[in-house]
Image (cartoon, grey):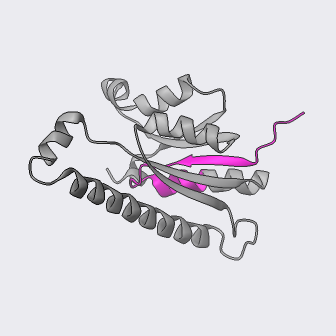
């Protein structure tokens, strides 16, 4: 029996290649009549970085700034996804409600992705990656590697071409 894909976790860093990756998530959602759960992880400041910030502003002000930033990122992501859906699904009813939920979560990207996949009973994770030199892959592709190493779910990794990445 073929696996049933009902929920797709689309991960994004909001970079220039995000719309390219979203098109693949949308294609999978349309093909399987599934819904998309979009997630963006906001990496926390290091302890050192936080202590530097709090030398100039209070902890409460810092927390408030982070909360506002999180709300702003969610608003930007919501608008981008709405625009992409209307552009990609022009005249199609099969993807009117493709994006079921949008989450902006504070945490390390691989941890956030794995937790959101589990919490939302995702059937597939869709994420993008940029092609880099061999050394760059070793240093930069760590989120994708960590997700793939620590999940039992299928992961659709989309290589973002240079012309889509803004490089």
| Residue at 45 percent of width and 62 percent of height | 74
Does the magenta segment cover residue 11?
A: yes
**Picture coordinates of residue 104 (x, y %)?**
46, 53
Instruction: Indicate the quadrant where residue 92 lies.
Output: bottom right
**Left or right relative to 45: residue 54:** left
Magenta extent: 1-24
**Picture coordinates of residue 6 (x, y %)?**
76, 48
In the rendered image, the quadrant that contains the N terminus is top right
**Left or right relative to 46: residue 80:** right
How many marks the image carries: the answer is 0
Above or below for 120 versus 110: below
Question: Which of the pair 7/53 is nearer the observer?
Answer: 53
**Left or right relative to 152: residue 112:** left
**Picture coordinates of residue 155 (x, y %)?**
61, 35
Above or below for 140 versus 158: above
Instruction: Indicate the quadrant where residue 62 lies.
Output: bottom left
Q: Can you name the residue that lies furthest to the right here? A: 1
| Residue at 48 percent of width and 27 percent of height | 145
| Residue at 76 percent of width and 66 percent of height | 94
**Left or right relative to 18: residue 26:** right
Q: Can you name the residue that lies furthest to the left here? A: 56
Question: Which of the pair 115/166 is nearer the observer?
Answer: 115
Does the magenta segment cover residue 66?
A: no
**Picture coordinates of residue 160 (x, y %)?**
46, 45
Above or below for 62 versus 108: below
């Amino acid at each position: 029996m073929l696996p049933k894909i009902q929920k797709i976790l689309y991960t994004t860093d909001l970079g220039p290649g995000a719309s390219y990756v979203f098109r693949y998530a949308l294609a999978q959602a349309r093909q399987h009549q599934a819904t998309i759960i979009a997630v963006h992880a906001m990496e926390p400041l290091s302890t050192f970085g936080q202590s530097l910030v709090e030398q100039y502003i209070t902890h409460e002000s810092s927390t408030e700034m982070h909360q506002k930033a999180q709300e702003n990122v969610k608003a930007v992501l919501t608008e981008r996804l709405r625009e992409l859906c209307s552009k990609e699904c022009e005249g199609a009813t099969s993807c009117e409600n493709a994006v079921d939920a949008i989450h902006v979560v504070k945490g390390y990207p691989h941890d956030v992705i794995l937790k959101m996949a589990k919490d939302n009973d995702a059937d597939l994770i869709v994420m993008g990656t940029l092609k880099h030199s061999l050394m760059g892959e070793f240093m930069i592709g760590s989120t994708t590697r960590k997700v793939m190493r620590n999940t039992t779910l299928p992961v659709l990794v989309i290589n973002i071409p240079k012309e889509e990445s803004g490089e």
